[in-house]
Amino acid sequence: MNKSELRDAVAAATDLSGAQADKAVSAVLDSITSALAAGDKVTLPGFGTFETRDRAARQGRNPQTGESMEIAASTSVGFKPGAQLKQAVARG
């Protein structure tokens, strides 16, 4: 599912127009992005939790040359699914 398919699903489920649903989806995504950029955790009960995770600097190896190189520290986004989401997608 891409963003336009998500917009269409939201529009169908809420009786909103496509433009209104697009604004709603964009607002949710922008709010999650802003919260994560500020270092906050975003918890959606039953769905899951988005949070930032710090990765320490480390030694790596260039696969083409075999030369050692320093990989800089970075911050990434992690997602931990909630129990209801896990149950909904479980096979079997």
Image (spheres, grey):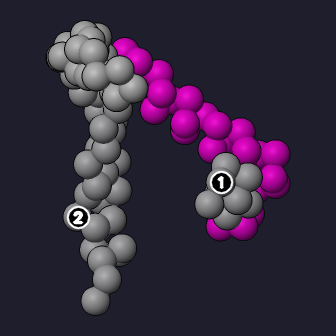
Which mark lies nearer to you, 1 or 2? Answer: 1
Label 1: few (<14), some (14–19) or many (≥20) C-alpha neighbours in 10 Å: few
At 46% from the left and 32% from the top, the residue drawn is 32
Q: Is residue 28 magenta?
A: yes
Horizontal arrangement in the rendering, residue 45 relative to residue 4 (left or right) = left
Quarter of the image with the C terminus is bottom left
Residue that label 1 marks: 2
**Where residue 62 sits in the image (x, y, percent)?**
33, 22
What label does residue 83 carry, if any?
2
Tell which residue pokes out farthest to the bottom in this image: 92
**Where residue 88 sits in the image (x, y, percent)?**
35, 75
Label 1 close to label 2 by CB (< 8 Å): no
Locate residue 60: give its quadrant: top left
Locate residue 36: give its quadrant: top left
**Where residue 18 sits in the image (x, y, percent)?**
81, 53
Number of marks: 2
Identify the main secondary structure in magenta: helix
Q: Along the polypeptide, which appears first: circle 1 or circle 2?
A: 1
Quarter of the image with the N terminus is bottom right
The answer to whether residue 68 is above or below residue 3 is above
At 26% from the left and 48% from the top, the residue drawn is 80
Q: Is residue 87 magenta?
A: no
Mark 1: amino acid: Asn
Q: Secondary structure at mark 2?
A: helix
At 81% from the left and 54% from the top, the residue drawn is 17
Cα distance in 3D space between marks 1 and 2: 24 Å
In magenta, the rendered stretch is: 12-41
Foreground pick, 16 / 37: 37
The answer to whether residue 63 is above or below residue 91 is above
**Where residue 28 sits in the image (x, y, percent)?**
55, 38
Mark 2: amino acid: Ala
Label 2: few (<14), some (14–19) or many (≥20) C-alpha neighbours in 10 Å: few
